[in-house]
Amino acid sequence: MFGLTALELARIQFGFTISFHIIYPAITIGLASYLAVLEGMWLWKKDAVYRDLYHFWSRIFAVNFAMGVVSGLVMAYQFGTNWSYFSAFAGSITGPLLAYEVLTAFFLEAGFLGVMLFGWHRVGPGLHFFSTVMVAIGTVISATWILASNSWMHTPQGFEIVEGVVVPVDWLAVIFNPSFPYRLAHMLTAAYLATALFVGASGAWHLLRGNDNPMVRRMLSMAMWMLLAVAPLQVLIGDQHGLNTLEHQPAKVAAMEGHWENTPGQGVPLILVGWPDQQAEVTRWKVEIPNLSSLILTHSWDGHYPGLKEFAPEDRPPVVVVFWTFRTMVGLGMLMVTLGLWAAWRRWRGRLYEGRWFLRFAALMGPSGLIAILAGWYTTEIGRQPWIIHGVMRTSEAVSDHSALTMSVTLVTFVVAYLIVFGIGTSYMLKLVGKGPEAGEDEPATAGDDPARRPARPLSAAPDPKEG
């Protein structure tokens, strides 16, 4: 069905489901830390604006957290159903790493989440703040274990192959594999950027609608400070990540840059735009800046790195997708830096909360952090192809023995179910954002003393839409 093989359909299905899953945990990571900052500032300054913002964003956090958990459940099952040969081959490493994530991060989050969402009037302020911080730390620990597992697939080490299966021989080497520190820093920073843009866009949107109050202004101000600090930092982290990728996955870098042949001793130009033709092994209609690619990737004016023709055709990733997703990520990153600098200039002029062009730009940039995360994820994962474990196991060797018809039916089922479930969830979350914060907001679960209204699940922290 669809003229695709079972392998291609399995890859599309995994890419589709993980595209949903990566969005919600990214916002969860950023919002958890944002809530910890808001509550800390409330305890320090006793400024009611921070308290009201905490209660407002905790509702949105609850909805987002619930959707992240639901989308993550599917991912675990797919390793066994669609990628059973991979699980049998490398499960001795990926299995424990994901189990550590559950035992450390998920249990930590689950243990303190109820207190964080529903305990504002039931526990002391110190314990409540501690719970919020623990949830924020739990989200970071969760990302750490997941990225350790995924990074090992990109730069595997600390293992041996015994009787056809992977056997770990050095867990520290497995966890702290060469790409892990860069990928962890890059992902966490991306999560904070995406959240800052989301919060900032909410503040800008409300200001554009005339909903100007101290809470909306504080949202925009805090978001723009975060953007100003973190967007340039992400550029530096991305530079170091690129050097690491060039060392360990040069074919991926060649695809990202769109270069087929690079001559030693001659500087490599940076291709701004173009169209890689994988059949003709050339990038057409390209616009270049001389020597800039050498300068960026080797920190030398005439530095050399291999082109795609230096790799066998069967070892090259899909060039067009990697080329353009990389440019999408970098282009959005440059816009983030621009927004941060523009906000700083307007703040210096005392006009941060004015100017419709600035506010429109901030509002339009709201989803850019999530789009950049998806583009970067596609770049790194599709750029790893044709390997599922780089240099060790090909993706074609990892897929389960399902027919194309089976994979087509399940793919269609996933698409329909996800669009319904997560479409409703996302729409509701955006509705909460659209209502905006109000002065004197309190945690919804404690409104009144009716025991029947005491929540039993995270999503209960969000108000009933019928009551809105």
Image (tube, rainbow, N blue to C red):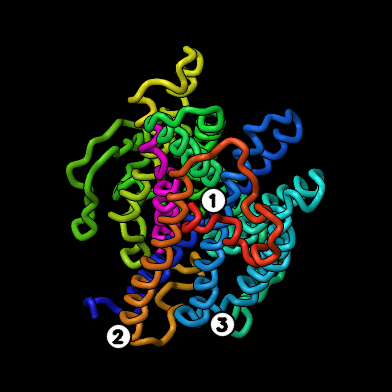
Q: Is residue 87 magenta?
A: no
Question: Comparing marks 2 and 3, which lies closer to the viewer?
Answer: 2
The residue segment tinted magenta is 361-385
Circle 3 residues within 10 Å: few <14, some 14–19, many ≥20: some
Q: CA distance from mark 2 to mark 1?
A: 39 Å
Q: Which residue is mark 3?
A: 88
255 or 113: nearer the viewer: 113
Q: What residue lies at 73% left-to-right and 49% top-to-bottom?
A: 120
In this view, 412 is above or below 304: below
The image quarter containing residue 89 is bottom right
Q: What residue lies at 45% left-to-right and 80% top-to-bottom?
A: 82
**Whether label 3 touches label 1, CB < 8 Å:** no
Circle 2 residues within 10 Å: few <14, some 14–19, many ≥20: some
Q: Which residue is mark 2?
A: 405
Residue 272 x, y percent position in the rendering = 29, 37
370 vs 65, left or right, is left
Q: Is residue 363 magenta?
A: yes
43 vs 86, left or right, is right
331 or 467: nearer the viewer: 467
Check disc 2 and report its element: helix, strand or loop: helix
Circle 1 residues within 10 Å: few <14, some 14–19, many ≥20: many
Q: What is the number of the mark on residue 188?
A: none
Q: CA distance from mark 2 to mark 3?
A: 24 Å
Q: What is the number of the mark on residue 60?
A: 1
In this view, 142 is above or below 431: below
Task: Of the two numbered discs 2 and 1 on the same chain, state the one appearing first in sequence.
Answer: 1
Q: Can you see residue 304?
A: no
The amino acid type found where label 1 is placed reads Ile
Check disc 3 and report its element: helix, strand or loop: helix
